[in-house]
Image (spheres, rainbow, N blue to C red):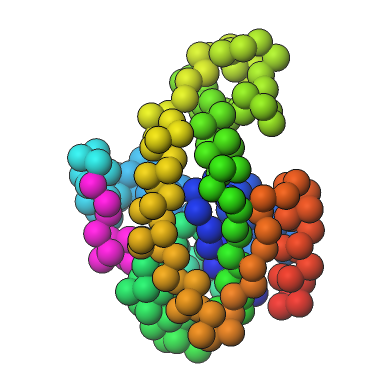
């Protein structure tokens, strides 16, 4: 099963991808996680990616594609994967198609998680991250036992700059401008399944699970 998860920031792609990976026994491939791993290991691709990230710039397509290709060639991705955070643009989607074509494979499904903007803003603006261990909480959905203090390590919780309501709305605009076109691109191939991510997380996951179970 080869799956791409699409959706705006805050739609829950990462959370659902982890659970789907465990249920179906295929790797969750997050470009963000790969960047961090490559940078930590100080690989050539990781060093190049880090030089752009440190300056606040987008990582060039050729670097992203190189990192994704390396990951897809690992043994655990031989029988399938769940891509989260890639592709972000139509050119990236076209390159992914070429990569898979060389393996005589293709995508089985593209799950598009959608939710109203106000729900996305509420989710992300309420997110709090531990400065020490990186644990994630939410002022409403997953509140810490003590306000501003991490339950796990006692570290300080803070809101990332890009989680402010204004920043979240800007990220939504960027998503709509750069990534939303992928829905039409994959829709023309009959791959898109729309999944309501504005409802309870458990309900969204059940919808995703039922869709992807068809491709086992």
Left or right of residue 138: residue 145: right
Boundaries of the magenta span: 57-66
Q: Quadrant of the C terminus?
A: bottom right
Q: Quadrant of the N terminus?
A: bottom right
Give coordinates of residue 121: x percent, y percent: 53, 39
Give coordinates of residue 197: x percent, y percent: 66, 53
Give coordinates of residue 91: x percent, y percent: 32, 74
Q: Is residue 61 magenta?
A: yes
Answer whether residue 69 is visible to the viewer in this image.
Answer: no
Main SS of residues in magenta: helix
Residue 208 placement: quadrant: bottom right
Residue 2 placement: quadrant: bottom right
| Above or below for 149 versus 115 | above
The residue under the point 28% across, 64% down is: 61
Q: Nearer the viewer, residue 168 or 143?
A: 168
The residue under the point 37% across, 73% down is: 90
Residue 23 placement: quadrant: bottom right
List the single residue furthest toward the bottom: 104
Q: Is residue 186 magenta?
A: no
Answer whether residue 107 is visible to the viewer in this image.
Answer: yes
The residue under the point 20% across, 40% down is: 55
Q: Nearer the viewer, residue 115 or 56?
A: 115
Give coordinates of residue 133: x percent, y percent: 52, 24
């Amino acid at each position: 099963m080869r799956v791409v998860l699409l959706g705006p920031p805050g739609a829950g792609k990462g959370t659902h991808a982890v659970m789907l990976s465990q249920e179906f026994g295929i790797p969750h491939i997050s470009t963000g996680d790969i960047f961090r791993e490559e940078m930590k290991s100080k690989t050539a691709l990781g060093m190049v990616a880090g030089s752009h990230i440190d300056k606040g710039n987008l990582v060039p397509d050729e670097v992203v594609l190189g990192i994704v290709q390396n990951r897809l060639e690992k043994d655990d991705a031989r029988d399938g994967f769940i891509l989260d955070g890639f592709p972000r643009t139509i050119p990236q989607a076209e390159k992914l198609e070429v990569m898979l074509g060389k393996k005589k494979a293709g995508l089985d499904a593209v799950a598009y998680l959608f939710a109203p903007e106000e729900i996305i803003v509420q989710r992300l603006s309420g997110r709090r991250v531990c400065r020490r261990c990186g644990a994630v909480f939410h002022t409403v959905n997953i509140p810490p036992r003590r306000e501003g203090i991490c339950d796990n390590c006692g570290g300080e919780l803070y809101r990332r700059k890009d989680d402010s309501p204004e920043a979240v709305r800007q990220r939504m605009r960027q998503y709509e401008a750069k990534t939303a076109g992928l829905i039409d691109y994959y829709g023309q191939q009959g791959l898109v399944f729309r999944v309501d991510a504005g409802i309870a997380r458990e309900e969204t996951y059940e919808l995703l699970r039922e869709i992807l179970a068809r491709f086992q």
